[in-house]
Amino acid sequence: MNGQKMKLGTREITTIGMLGAIATILMLFEIPLPFAPPFYEIDFSEVPVLIGCFAMGPLAGALIEFVKILLNFIINGTATAGVGEIANFCIGCAFCLPAGLIYCKKKTKKGAILSLAIGTLVMTFLGCFINAYIMLPTYAKAFQMPLDAIVEMGTKVNAGITDLFTFVMFAVVPFNLLKGILVSIVVLLIYKKISPIIKRH
């Protein structure tokens, strides 16, 4: 199966759906962080997305991400009229697409490490802008509270958070970096063991 010219046959669609469902389940298991407000919790739902990316290419990864967000939307609904879900999709793709594109060109252990490192950095960089200009203002509007109230939630766990900029620097950036590192470690540990099963499937 070519990672760059993936054909969406029945087998590929089934695998995408399966990995998307697993990712949705993993979204339910969230880990709170001591340095960020309670609505920033780490989950490992990007692991199946990246495994699909590496095994079938970046297009498959984006589709798995879409299935994950869609199923979560159907199961849990939305508090942001879908804006939060779209933002989460964009951040997830910012992680998996660069990683998948690089790994397609260099399918070695070093290539995998490089791809995951770059994916983590892209996700972190893009996540700053999406959180600052889309997600946080949307959440503030959805819950009918001023943006300053969300910043204050950050101040309670980290005195260094005093405005939107420091909120992004001290909460969003470390959150995305930590998530990227932890997810990358899991993918590196299990991909080679799981990929033959996915390709046979």
Image (tube, rainbow, N blue to C red):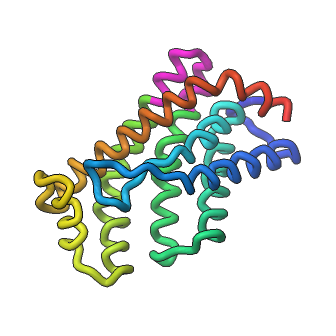
Residue 7 against residue 32 in the figure, above or below: above
Residue 134 in the image: x percent, y percent?
36, 66
Query: In the rendered structure, does residue 76 fall within the stretch colored magenta?
Result: no
Residue 194 against residue 96 in the figure, above or below: above
Query: In the rendered structure, does residue 105 fall within the stretch colored magenta?
Result: yes
Residue 99 against residue 11 in the figure, above or below: above
Residue at 21% in and 48% down: 170
Quarter of the image that includes the N terminus: top right
In the image: residue 89, left or right of residue 57: left
In the image: residue 103, left or right of residue 165: right
Quadrant assignment, res 182: top left
Quarter of the image that includes the C terminus: top right
In the image: residue 120, left or right of residue 131: right
Residue 60 in the image: x percent, y percent?
68, 44
Task: Specify start and end residues of the magenta stretch as a single range.
Answer: 101-116
Residue 134 against residue 201 in the figure, above or below: below
Toward the viewer: 38 or 48?
38
Residue at 37% in and 65% down: 135
Q: Provide the major secondary structure of the magenta segment.
A: helix
